[in-house]
Structure formats: C-alpha cells, structure tokens
Image (spheres, helix red, strand yellow):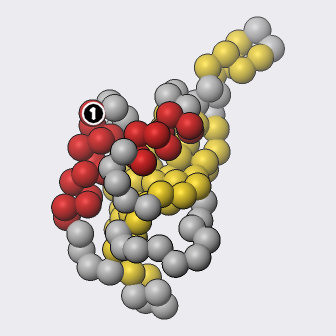
Amino acid sequence: MTLEGLYAELNALGMPLAYHQHTGAVSLPFLVYRLEGSDDLMADNHNYVEISDVAIELYSNKKDTASEALVEAKLKELRIPYVKHEVWIQDEELFMTLYEVTII
C-alpha cells in the first residue's frame, strides 16, 4: 500500500480528505492524513521494503461513531491494523479521532 493508494481508499468514504491540512472551509466530518515517519526494512545497502507510519485524523463536532465505523471498516477491509486515540480540541470545539497505522 502506498500513500496514494491509501488516499484513494479513504477518499472512497465520501468525506472531505486532505494530506496534512485542509485549506479553506470544509464540512464536518472530515479526514486528514499525513506521513509521520518511516521504518523501512533495509538490506544490501538499500531500502528493501518501504514501511510508513501514517496518522489518519477524523474531525467532527460531536462523538461520531458512524464516521468512526466507516474509517475502521475500511482499515479492516484493507487489513491495516490501527491504534485509536480520541482528543477534544477545546479551541476548535472539535473531536479528533486519531488512527495510527503502518502501511507496507
């Protein structure tokens, strides 16, 4: 799976989606994803297998279990394990549900 492939799969969920940040007004709920780093498997003096750590953020103005279920079902369909965190962003009055994933 590549970042481009992940974008295509997340975009199919029908929510506004952007890499790193949205520019301008966007309707809720929306998704943002970004590369957090890499931990490639190296052999014979080159990167043998690309392994990328990616953050997927779901933003909503309330606890949105339906949108969370869509994201989680997509990750399960793609067989991408995730770790989930939830944060209330007081200044923005938004919930952020963070999915930490690794794509290979």
> 13 or 80: which is nearer to us?
13
Q: Residues within 10 Å of mark 1 (few under 14, many from 20)?
A: few
Q: Is residue 31 visible to the viewer in this orientation of the structure?
A: yes
Q: How many marks?
A: 1
Q: Position of residue 10 (x, y in %)?
A: 41, 46
Asked where in the image residue 41 lies, by quadrant, the reply is top right
Asked where in the image residue 78 lies, by quadrant, the reply is top left
SS at mark 1 in the image: helix
Q: Position of residue 35 (x, y in %)?
A: 61, 48
In the orientation shown, which residue stands out farthest toward the bottom? 91
Residue 16 versus residue 52 in the image, above or below: below
Q: Which residue is mark 1?
A: 77
Residue at point 50%, 28% (across, down): 1
**Is 83 displayed left or right of 8 in the figure?**
left
Q: Position of residue 56 (x, y in %)?
A: 46, 54
Amino acid type at mark 1: Glu
**Is 82 displayed left or right of 51 in the figure?**
left
Residue 5 versus residue 32 in the image, above or below: above
**Is 74 displayed left or right of 31 in the figure?**
left
Residue at point 56%, 38% (across, down): 3
> 57 or 18: which is nearer to us?
18
Q: Position of residue 86 (x, y in %)?
A: 35, 68
Q: Is residue 87 visible to the viewer in this orientation of the structure?
A: no
Residue at point 64%, 45% (across, down): 37
**Is 47 displayed left or right of 12 in the figure?**
right
